[in-house]
């Protein structure tokens, strides 16, 4: 009885962590979606986010205690810096005529940078998971599934909002990314 209760507690903890990590993908997906995104790009970006939400904690899990003292600040600064760059670029492009491809979510590099930035906190979570007894594969599956589903929902909500905001959607999306970048850094 006590063992079954502990297993349910572990499952609930894993789901709460998966949702918490997926919230980054959700909220930042709204910002990207407001820039304007096609359904094919929603799917591609969400799949890549799911992959990173599995790979980053797996790498973190195996990185072990050696990096744990460095991770808290470094990962926040890297994620925040990437989001600041992406947000500033989006705002800059909103008020500039013409298209550019740097950090464009439609390119593979832009999608990769975005997926990495919303998944980097999973790395430090993976390190902490290595210190506890947990079902690694169940945890990775939950992280990947939540990252995928929450990014799809966020991107679709942002896409819908973009239709109602017109040309200012990209600037608002960039401002959202800037705000989250600052939150990561501060």
Image (spheres, rainbow, N blue to C red):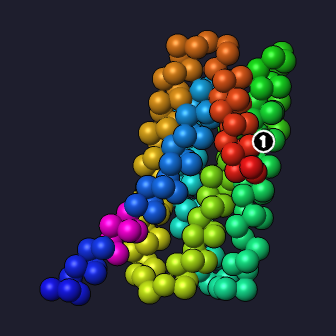
Q: Outermost residue, front direction?
A: 186
Residue 102 in magenta? no
- Residue 136 pos. (x, y %): 45, 80
Secondary structure of residue under mark 1: helix
Q: Nearer the viewer, residue 125 or 112?
A: 125
**Circle 1 crowding by C-alpha within 10 Å: few under 14, some 14–19, many from 20:** many
Residue at figure coordinates x 63%, y 69% from the top left: 123
Residue at figure coordinates x 66%, y 24% from the top left: 172
- Residue 88 pos. (x, y %): 80, 33
**Residue placed under numbered mark 1 in the picture:** 84
* Residue 59 in sight in this render: yes
- Residue 12 pos. (x, y %): 33, 67
Residue at figure coordinates x 68%, y 56% from the top left: 116
Is residue 57 toward the left or the right of residue 139 in the image? right
| Above or below: residue 49 compared with residue 35 | below
- Residue 166 pos. (x, y %): 61, 12
Residue 14 in magenta? yes
Residue at figure coordinates x 67%, y 13% from the top left: 167
* Magenta range: 10-15
């Amino acid at each position: 009885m006590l063992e079954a209760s502990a297993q349910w507690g572990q499952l609930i903890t894993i789901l709460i962590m998966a949702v918490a990590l997926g919230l980054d993908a959700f909220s930042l997906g709204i910002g990207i979606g407001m820039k304007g995104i096609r359904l094919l790009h929603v799917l591609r970006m969400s799949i890549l986010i799911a992959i990173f939400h599995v790979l980053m904690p797996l790498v973190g899990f195996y990185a072990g205690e050696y990096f744990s003292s460095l991770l808290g600040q470094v990962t926040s600064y890297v994620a925040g810096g990437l989001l600041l760059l992406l947000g500033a670029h989006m705002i800059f492009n909103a008020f500039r005529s013409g298209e550019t491809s740097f950090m464009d979510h439609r390119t593979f590099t832009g999608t990769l940078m975005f997926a990495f930035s919303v998944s980097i906190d999973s790395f430090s979570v993976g390190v902490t998971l290595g210190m506890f007894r947990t079902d690694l594969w169940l945890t990775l599956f939950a992280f990947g599934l939540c990252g995928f589903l929450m990014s799809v929902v966020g991107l679709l909500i942002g896409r819908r909002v973009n239709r109602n905001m017109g040309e200012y959607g990209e600037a608002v999306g960039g401002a959202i990314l800037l705000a989250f970048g600052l939150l990561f850094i501060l």
